[in-house]
Image: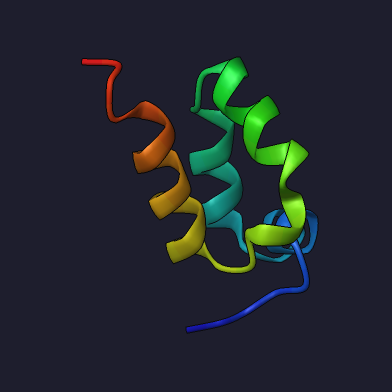
């Protein structure tokens, strides 16, 4: 699994992660952006989104 320094380098380098991120609700994007240092792979991005959206259904 490819690891990046933060969310921004992940989105810059990984087209799949960028497309996924762009489909997320604005509040999820904002929350993840506030913790950009904690997101360093597509897998960690997905895990974070799952945690944030668990109660949205």
Residue beneath the point at 71% across and 66% down: 13
User: Colour scheme of this structure image?
Assistant: rainbow
Give x and y (percent) for residue 36. Answer: 74, 51
Which residue is at 71% across, 55% downward?
7
Q: Residue furthest bottom?
A: 1
**Tag count:** 0
Relative to 42, residue 33 above or below: above
Query: Where 18 falls versus 56 (above or below)?
Result: below
Q: As drawn, is 14 to the left or to the right of 13?
A: left
The residue furthest left is 57
| Figure check: 36 above or below 23 | below
Position of 40 with respect to 34 (left or right) is left
Vertical placement of residue 4 versus 13, above or below: below
Image quadrant containing the C terminus: top left
Counting from the top left corner in percent of width and height, residue 37 is at 76, 59
x%, y% of residue 14? Answer: 62, 63
Q: Residue at x 28, y 21 (%)?
A: 55
Residue in front for this viewpoint, 20 or 56: 56
């Amino acid at each position: 699994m490819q690891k990046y320094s933060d969310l921004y380098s992940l989105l810059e380098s990984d087209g799949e992660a960028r497309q996924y991120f762009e489909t997320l609700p604005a509040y999820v994007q904002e929350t993840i952006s506030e913790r950009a240092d904690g997101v360093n792979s597509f897998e960690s991005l997905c895990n974070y989104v799952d945690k944030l959206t668990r109660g949205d259904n």
